[in-house]
């Protein structure tokens, strides 16, 4: 197979980074990105893009740690380069605070982020309702810049991108040799994965340029994440809710919760409300599958179900998916050799 | 009781506010006036980035360390107040970088979360092998000075835009106490060979992705002669110039290039930052701050001057501790003049 045709379905952070990894591991591949949405209308665009991992209950911890480490290392190098501002990648320091003792004193990612340590008593005084805390420095991927940067890198490799709603992966079998499914929440419909469920998140994006630190309540519900131009205030975790409409009561509640963590937010301006559905699953599905109908086979690589942790592990899962694509190519080459005998 | 403050930078305005807050209720006849040739945004304080950070060593000057601490603690306490945004006050964390191990600074327990940098963090800064991380405060002059001015105006303090030529000039008009907060120009009022300019130049850029201050140190070339990057609420300040004895307030192309090249080397992403301004100013440098009373004989009158100048490159860092000390000196003047000892009621 001289130039395998690979279709990547989905143009959020997972789709674009997976496509990019494929062009890197398989330069002879012809990669096309197909998606019904591109930035700034993907779920990724709603997310703050903070590199603070979400723990998947059914994925082995060592695998999650490897994904996070690869992602952090990759972004760290970009943040340190002249491209940092274009890519939207920047370092940010801050605090994760807890009202009651955290489940783990040392999360699995504590040695990957920078300078992780417990907060001092003096630091905790800023958070009178909280009794424990962790201070560290991590990275943030701002969207749309990061998605735009990924698109730019893809275009430079000759990757085509088309707006297209794929109703069924099989519809691609005649045009493409391999399909990579990075459809996020769309996989619920596209492949009928009932293990995939939405966790609705509402956020506010505000102008508060004096806020230089992230603050996150360990319960994961209240957070303040400063981006390049706007600060993301969150949030909600509404399991099973499919609604993409902002709820005004929720807006008020998020604002109040964030102001109690950071009172200066009372002065925030230009409040924008956004909603995203975290494509959640007990384990991220990074897996090969072969679809077949009437003797025709279509190799598929799945890479979806990143839930609340997409940005944190995107490059690691993209690498893994790209290797699975390589395996698919070898398998195809093997079977085409066998077919020739 | 007429009190004239000379100078409307951070030292003059904060000293005025401190004195008015503490003594206005106790001395009903207190009249406070501020005289200056420059007001915000044209003072030296307006050019400063506003980062709270003393020099690396206090040279055994414990008094100054205590004033620094007083300032930090005071503003830390005001972080959660509704006025913080208007004051230009916010928390900021960042890096101090060295090419060799150094002793911990006198202020390590004043700031929050002081620690050494890890090897991985040092990878961010090739050429630097040692460093600190800590959380400190920003108090942006361009917000803080107008805020002080508003508070003073509300309290009925009068402002006069004029260059005072001598202390006598004010005393002959009936001023009882002069607060000399004239910064770099103190030598014009009373010669002081110890006061020398520490010229600085800065470039203002738009780089909103920078969330940390980064201050490098070259122990051989002295403080602030090594690149630094300090992100404010609107723009980021790039600097790294300290020229002792240079009185020029003009921007130098050579210094511009030095700042730009060295800061871009420190943080490559700055190459894409848009330059929005440039400024030069004179840090009023002195071996130690002159904060003391001086009695001046004028005929048969004794006039009092409280000097509060020579804060070098750490004026914002130390200002509140100094303002409180100046207020204490004022209090002792009042006691001597029996202004405080008098109980309320008709005076004999």
Image (cartoon, coloured by chain):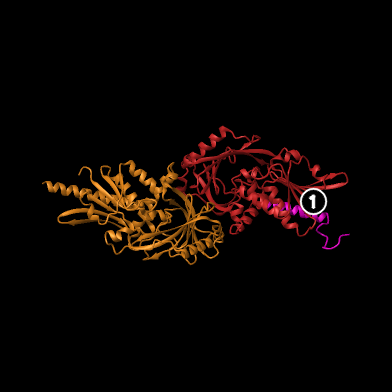
Chain colours: A orange, B red
Vertical arrangement, residue B345 with respect to residue A37, above or below: below
What percent of the width, then of the height, locates residue A28?
25, 42
| Residue B201 visible to an observer of this rendering | no
Residue B345 image position (x, y, % from top left) = 84, 63
Return the residue found at the far top.
B254
- The quarter in which the C terminus of chain B is drawn is bottom right
Q: Residue B345: within the magenta?
A: yes
For disc 1, the marked residue is B2
Q: Is residue A8 visible?
A: yes
Nearest the viewer among B168 and A163 is: A163
Residue B109: image quadrant is bottom right
Q: Range of the magenta residues?
A: B321-348
Q: How many marks?
A: 1
Q: Does residue B27 show up magenta in the picture?
A: no
Residue in the picture at 69% in, 40% down: B184
Helix, strand or loop under label 1: strand
Q: Look at the picture and state if A235 lies above or below B158.
A: below
**Residue B18 or residue A297, whichever sits in front:** A297
Residue B38 x, y percent position in the rendering: 69, 42
The crowd level at tag 1 (other Cα within 10 Å; few <14, some 14-19, many 20+) is: some
Q: Residue furthest left?
A: A341
Residue B32 horizontal side relative to residue A193, left or right: right
Instruction: Give the percent coordinates (x, y) of residue B275.
Output: 52, 39
Instruction: Indicate the chain on which mark 1 is placed.
Output: B
A212 left or right of B333 in image: left
Outermost residue to the bottom: A100
């Amino acid at each position: 197979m001289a130039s395998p045709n690979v279709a990547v379905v989905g143009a959020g952070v997972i789709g674009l980074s997976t496509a990019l990894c494929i062009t890197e591991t398989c330069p002879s591949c012809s990669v096309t990105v197909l998606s019904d949405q591109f930035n700034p209308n993907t779920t990724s665009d709603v997310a703050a893009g903070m590199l603070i991992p979400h723990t998947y209950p059914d994925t082995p911890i060592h695998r999650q740690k490897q994904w996070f480490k690869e992602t952090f290392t990759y972004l760290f190098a970009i943040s340190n380069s002249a491209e940092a501002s274009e890519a939207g990648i920047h370092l940010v320091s801050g605090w994760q605070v807890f009202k009651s003792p955290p489940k783990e004193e040392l999360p699995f990612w504590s040695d990957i982020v920078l300078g992780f340590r417990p907060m001092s008593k003096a630091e905790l005084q800023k958070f009178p309702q909280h009794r424990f805390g962790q201070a560290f420095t991590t990275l943030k991927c701002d969207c749309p810049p990061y998605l735009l940067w990924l698109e730019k890198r893809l275009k430079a490799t000759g990757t085509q991108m088309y707006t297209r709603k794929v109703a069924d992966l099989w519809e691609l079998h005649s045009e493409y040799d391999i399909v990579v499914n990075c459809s996020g929440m769309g996989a619920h419909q596209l492949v009928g994965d009932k293990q995939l469920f939405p966790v609705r998140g509402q956020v506010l994006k505000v102008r508060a340029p004096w806020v230089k630190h992230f603050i996150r309540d360990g319960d994961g519900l209240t957070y303040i994440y400063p981006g390049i131009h706007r600060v993301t205030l969150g949030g909600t975790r509404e399991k099973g809710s499919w609604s993409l409409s902002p709820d005004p009561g929720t807006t008020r509640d998020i604002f109040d919760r964030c102001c109690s963590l950071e009172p200066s937010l009372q002065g925030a301006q230009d409040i924008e409300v956004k909603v995203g559905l975290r494509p959640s699953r007990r384990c991220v599905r990074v897996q090969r599958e072969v679809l077949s109908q009437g003797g025709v086979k279509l190799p598929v690589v799945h890479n979806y179900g990143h839930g609340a942790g997409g940005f944190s592990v995107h490059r690691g899962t993209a690498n893994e998916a790209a290797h699975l694509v390589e395996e698919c190519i070898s398998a195809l080459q093997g079977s085409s050799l066998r077919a020739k005998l | 009781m007429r009190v004239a403050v000379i100078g409307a930078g951070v030292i003059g305005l904060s000293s005025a506010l401190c004195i008015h807050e503490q003594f206005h209720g106790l001395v009903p006849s207190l009249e406070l006036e501020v005289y200056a040739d420059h007001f915000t945004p044209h003072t030296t304080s307006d050019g400063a980035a506003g980062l709270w950070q003393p020099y690396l060593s206090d040279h055994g000057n414990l008094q100054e360390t205590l004033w620094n601490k007083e300032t930090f603690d005071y503003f830390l306490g005001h972080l959660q107040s509704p006025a913080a945004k208007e004051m230009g006050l916010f928390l900021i964390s960042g890096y101090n970088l060295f090419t060799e191990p150094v002793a911990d600074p006198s202020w390590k327990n004043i700031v929050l979360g002081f620690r050494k940098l890890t090897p991985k963090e040092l990878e961010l800064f090739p050429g630097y092998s040692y460093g600190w991380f800590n959380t400190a405060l920003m108090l942006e002059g361009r917000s803080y000075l107008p805020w002080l001015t508003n508070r003073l105006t509300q309290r009925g303090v009068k402002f006069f835009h004029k260059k005072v030529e001598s202390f006598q000039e004010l005393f002959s008009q009936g001023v009882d106490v002069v607060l000399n907060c004239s910064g770099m120009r103190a030598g014009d009022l009373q010669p002081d060979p110890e006061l020398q300019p520490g010229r600085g130049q800065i470039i203002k850029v738009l780089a909103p992705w920078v969330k940390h201050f980064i201050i490098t140190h070259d122990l051989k070339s002295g403080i602030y002669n090594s690149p630094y990057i300090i992100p404010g609420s609107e723009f980021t300040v790039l600097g790294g110039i300290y020229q002792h004895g240079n009185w020029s307030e003009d921007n130098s192309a050579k210094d511009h290039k030095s700042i730009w090249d060295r800061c871009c080397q420190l943080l490559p992403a700055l190459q894409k930052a848009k330059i929005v301004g440039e400024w030069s100013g004179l840090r009023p440098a002195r071996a130690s701050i002159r904060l003391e009373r001086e009695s001046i004989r004028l005929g048969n009158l004794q006039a009092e001057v409280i000097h509060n100048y020579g804060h070098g490159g750490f004026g914002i860092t130390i200002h509140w501790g100094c303002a409180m000390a100046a207020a204490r000196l004022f209090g002792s003047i009042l006691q001597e003049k029996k202004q405080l000892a008098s109980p309320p009621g008709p005076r004999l």
